[in-house]
Amino acid sequence: MDYDKTKYKVWTWKNPMMLYWIISLLLFGIQYSYGQERGNKINTIIDSLRIIETQKWTLKIKIEPLKCEATEEDSLKLIEIENVLTDQEIRKRIIQAFNKVLTDNEINYLYNFTTSSVFHKVFNSSLINNSLINQFKDINSKLDSIARNYEKKMKIFQSLNRYP
């Protein structure tokens, strides 16, 4: 393409300033997408595995008995702890734990598993549960029969014990 070189100054990609901008944009894009991708994957893993709910349940099991035995000062500490334990705070701490322990490959592996059809069939649908029920129908039938016989014997025994 011909142009008036006195009027216009055209930089090619070989110009140091153009190279700087190209490399900077590439690095920024890679860093931004890498950070976002890892964070999004960790959040998906946390949601799929219901880690927040599990952690809340675990902490509740520890906190509830202490409420009955806590003194005034300890009661205030327990209330303070419960107020700090929001879903956002728990998520933040779980993300920190994941970032300390798991590599990018491990995050990718977990993410791929938790978003797979196998994960959803096993953990989030009734397909496996229904199939298991069908596979153990004969065993459950025998167990139900034994339980009914036991209940009958218990009723007879209770009725005999009513009258001395």
Image (cartoon, rainbow, N blue to C red):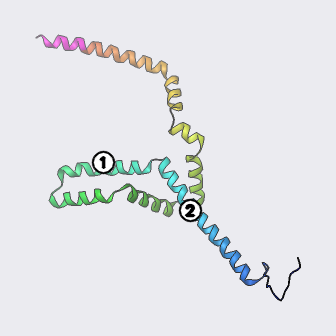
Residue, x 61% and y 64% (percent of image)? 33
Q: Which three-letter amino acid code belongs to the residue tagged 1?
A: Ile
Under mark 2, the amino acid is Gln
Does the magenta stretch mainly form a helix, a strand or a loop?
helix
The answer to whether residue 67 is left or right of residue 114 is left
Residue 61: mark: 1
Judged from the image, the secondary structure of the residue bearing numbered disc 1 is helix
Q: Quadrant of the C terminus?
A: top left
Q: Is residue 128 magenta?
A: no
Circle 2 residues within 10 Å: few <14, some 14–19, many ≥20: few
Q: Residue 139, position in %: x, y?
A: 46, 20
**Left or right: where 120 falls relative to 161:** right
Residue 160 among those drawn in magenta: yes
Q: Secondary structure at mark 2?
A: helix
**x, y (%) of residue 119?**
55, 42
Mark 1 vs mark 2, foreground winner is 2
Q: Which residues are magenta?
A: 155-164
Q: Is residue 63 above or below residue 139?
A: below
Residue at which label 2 appears: 36
- Residue placed furthest toward the left: 164
- Sequence-wise, which precedes: disc 1 or disc 2? 2
